[in-house]
Image (tube, rainbow, N blue to C red):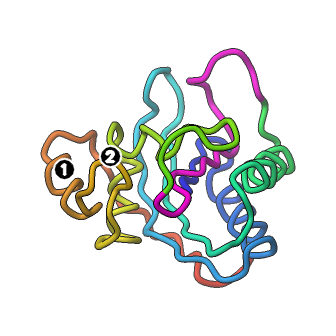
Amino acid sequence: MSVGSNVQREASIRGAIADLRRYFGPLSISPVYETEAIGFEGEPFYNLVVGIDTRLGVAEINRLLRDIEDAHGRVRGPNKFAPRTLDLDLLTWGEAAGTIDGSELPRDEILKYGFVLAPLAQAAPADRHPVDGRTYAELWAQMAPHAQPLTPVSLDLRASP
């Protein structure tokens, strides 16, 4: 899943990681990157990707992600591109492709945005995109020269807050 925040970034990200561990156990966590806001004027985002191992279905995972967002002060409005304390999006669910429980998977953001693909390529370089078929490392190698700037952030998320 992708994890992003541009409001109280460090506290929001740390809180999300703690909650994700509580719900899903051990996590695979990518490095954190800072990127400029896309689609609106706002503070820069912290972005990363988290891998989970679960038997839950897509609807149940998405419900938990919304609950975590809400617990951390996420304000939902009509504008998709707006500041947010926390944005959690399920990117893939195994090898599934298509509309599953109302969610289109894999999410198109993987192939559109470097702030999603770069951390995904670091967290799971040999995994293959369920539709495209290339590895995330291959996809990132192609996108990297054209992607928006990504600045690595020194934020140790290995231990719970």
Q: Are marks 2 and 1 in contact (CB under 8 Å)?
A: yes
Seen from the viewer's position, the closer of residues 61 and 94 is 94
Q: Which mark is residue 114?
A: 2
Question: Residue 56, labelled with which disc?
Answer: none
Residue lying at the far top of the rendered structure:
78
- Tell me where residue 115 appears, x and y as whole percent: 39, 48
Q: Residue at x 23, y 58 (%)?
A: 134
Depicted 116 relative to depicted 94: above or below: above
Residue 107 position within the rendered picture, expressed as x and y whole percent measured from the top left:
48, 42
In this rendering, position of residue 79 left or right of residue 136? right
Q: Residues within 10 Å of mark 2 (few under 14, many from 20)?
A: many
Mark 1 neighbour class, 10 Å CA radius: few under 14, some 14 to 19, many 20 or more: some
Please tell me whether mark 2 sits on a helix, a strand or a loop.
helix
**Mark before the other along the chain sequence, 2 or 1:** 2
Residues shaded magenta: 76-95
Amino acid type for the residue under numbered disc 2: Gly
Report how far apart the C-alphas of labels 2 and 1 lie in the structure: 7 Å
Q: Is residue 86 magenta?
A: yes
In the picture, the quarter occupied by the C terminus is bottom right
| Magenta stretch: includes residue 136 | no
Direction from residue 111 to residue 97 in the image, left or right? right
At label 1, the amino acid type is: Ala
Q: Position of residue 84 (x, y in %)?
A: 67, 36
Q: Which residue is mark 1?
A: 144
Q: Secondary structure at mark 1?
A: helix
**How many numbered tags mark residues here?**
2
Q: Quadrant of residue 159?
A: bottom right
2 or 90, which is in the foreground? 90
Q: Residue at x 27, y 39 (%)?
A: 148
Q: Which is the main secondary structure of the residues drawn in magenta?
A: loop
- The quadrant where residue 27 appears: bottom right
